[in-house]
Image (cartoon, coloured by chain):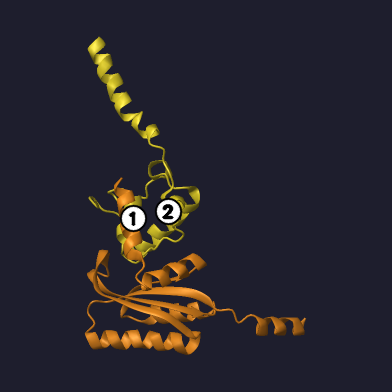
Chain colours: A orange, B yellow
Amino acid sequence: MATKTKSKKTETVVLKDYESVIIFTPVLSDEQLKDAVAKYRKLITDEAGELVHEENWGLTKLAYPIQKKSTGFYHLYEFRSKPDFISKLELAFRRDERIMRYLSVSLDKHAVIYNQRKRNGEFNQGKKDQKQEGAK
Amino acid sequence: MKKKSNATTAMVFNTMPEAPQKKKFCRFKKNGIKYLDYKDGNFLLKFVNDQGKVLPRRLTGTSLKYQRKVAQAIKRARHIAVLPFTGDSLK
């Protein structure tokens, strides 16, 4: 039994694809925001391994107020990690007062392809097609 | 009498036959879209009525497989405040 569990542990170092969207409070200054973003970038690269992509949407209007604020700094991390890293990451998010909201999502293979294509800017045409089709 | 009945039948026939004439299709199957981005609020607006409720399959024509994904994406979008939970005039 013991040998079995051991072998299992060594075998399964499977990385999964994840994506986290964080909304920081709009109260932060540019530097504070940079610090916060850098903190989680470091956490991900140190513990998880691979930061695939990072995106900053800047100060964005919220669809509804959160903590009585109508705007927020959105930041997106796409990374590959072991599944048990997510709980650690989310714990850190919850402890951080600068974060109003977060959402971590595991990505399936279609999502990974989609994100890659989006990054390469392939979607401008595709979106136009969809819009036309929706108009019909 | 006749005029009245004509009016009512006309009403019914105006609304009824138009829908079946156009065969509905699943836009995801047709266009080969396999992933719905919950960050794309404008696209998700098509699957939501002006109150912000998810539209049923019978109106949008989406297949069941993708309707589930639409619902999931809309819920995620609401959580990160890309879409509102409720609204009066979204469109």
Residue B33: x and y in percent read 44, 57
Image quadrant containing the N terminus of chain A: bottom right
Furthest toward the right, the residue is A1
A42 shown above or below A125: below
Q: Horizontal placement of B58 versus B46: left or right?
A: right
Pointer 1 chain: A
Determine which of the numbered discs, if any, sits on residue A129 in the image.
Answer: 1
Q: Given the image, on which type of amino acid does mark 2 rest?
A: Asn
Q: Looking at the image, do the residues carrying marks 2 and 1 touch, with CB atoms under 8 Å apart? A: yes
Say above or below: A30 vs A111: below
Q: Which residue is mark 2?
A: B31
From this view, report whether residue B18 is shown above or below residue B85.
Answer: above
Q: Please provide percent x and percent y for residue A119.
A: 37, 73
Res. B84 in view: no
Q: CA distance from mark 2 to mark 1?
A: 9 Å
Q: Residues within 10 Å of mark 1 (few under 14, many from 20)?
A: few
Q: Name the residue located 33 percent from the left edge and 55 percent from the top edge.
A: A129
Can you give x and y, in whole percent of width and height, for residue A29 in the image?
Answer: 22, 84
